[in-house]
Image (tube, rainbow, N blue to C red):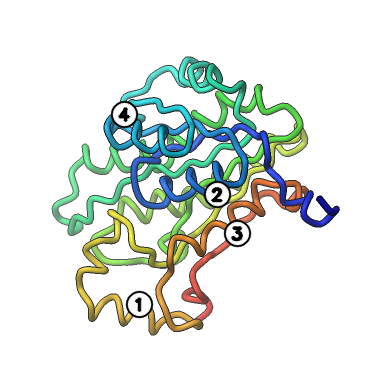
Amino acid sequence: MDATAARFDIEGRVALVTGASSGIGKHMAAALAQAGAKVVVIARRKDSIEALATEISGQAITCDLNAIDDFKQLAKQASEPFGAPDILINAAGVNHRQPVDEITAQSWQDTLQLNLSVPFFLSRALVPGMESNGSIINIASLQSERAFPNSMPYGASKGGITQLTRAMAEAWSAQGVRTNALAPGFFPTELTQAVFDDSDKAAANAAQTCIGRNGELEDLVGPMLFLCSSASAYVTGQVLYVDGGFTAK
């Protein structure tokens, strides 16, 4: 392996991916395994997460992250199959898409808990085991910067993720644990199914990009591997928009 390729190499690293039963989390988990990482996946849908773990020769943890009150114990459980993770992908998320007058205290709290609180508390529990070679990737959103209808709690949580990413970088980068975020544009996932089911909306979103199309999940793999690897050793506290130039227009 030449020096350039070695910078992007994650062979033998241990990765933990939340929200891995579908969408972005599932695709990232599979890509990490293909790149040679040992992968532990977390989701609440037992059949889906165990099927993925079998497919990628990884390990599955079935749980509802919103119900976890002991993240140190979860970190210990995640370390049992392959050792302490040194890559964490915080991909679990929810968007109830409620009109503003229908938002309840419970739906607001559930959204902020899973999208914002869980990434912090899980990351904090894992940092001691990441030593001097850790990479945490949060999942931001177009709504970290733009407002969309029927998504106020989601937008609040994803706006918070950008600042949380910076704060986590400030707290832990000197220990060798970098934190960055990926902000996807419109990608076909369960969270965006309603958008892609409406061909006019999907076309309008594609037209808003500089590239002229919506995202494909494979478009996220290169940026993710960059942020996981030593190629990004001097990159921390950043939000990388993988949106085809949506936010540039």
Dot 2 crowding, Cα within 10 Å, few <14, some 14–19, many 20+: some
State the image coordinates of residue 214 (x, y, percent, origin top left).
Answer: 40, 73
Identify the secondary structure beneath mark 2: helix
Q: Which residue is mark 1?
A: 205
Residue for badge 4 = 64
Callout 3 amino acid: Gly
Q: Earlier in the sequence, mark 3 or mark 2?
A: 2
Precedes in sequence: disc 1 or disc 4 = 4
Please tell me the numbered disc located at residue 222.
Answer: 3
Q: Nearer the viewer, residue 53 or 62?
A: 53
Q: CA distance from mark 3 to mark 2?
A: 24 Å
Q: Is residue 12 left or right of residue 89?
A: right
- The answer to which image quadrant residue 159 occupies is bottom left
Disc 2: which residue? 163
- Front residue of 143 and 216: 216
**Disc 4 to disc 3, how far (Cα)?**
29 Å
- Dot 1 or dot 2, earlier in sequence: 2
Q: Within 10 Å of the Cα at label 3, are there few (<14), some (14-19), or many (20+) other Cα atoms? A: few
Q: Amino acid at mark 2?
A: Gln
Closer to viewer: mark 3 or mark 2: 3
Quote the CA–CA distance across marks 1 and 2. Answer: 26 Å
| Residue drawn at (63%, 44%) of the image | 179
Kindly tell me whether residue 171 is visible in this rendering. Answer: no
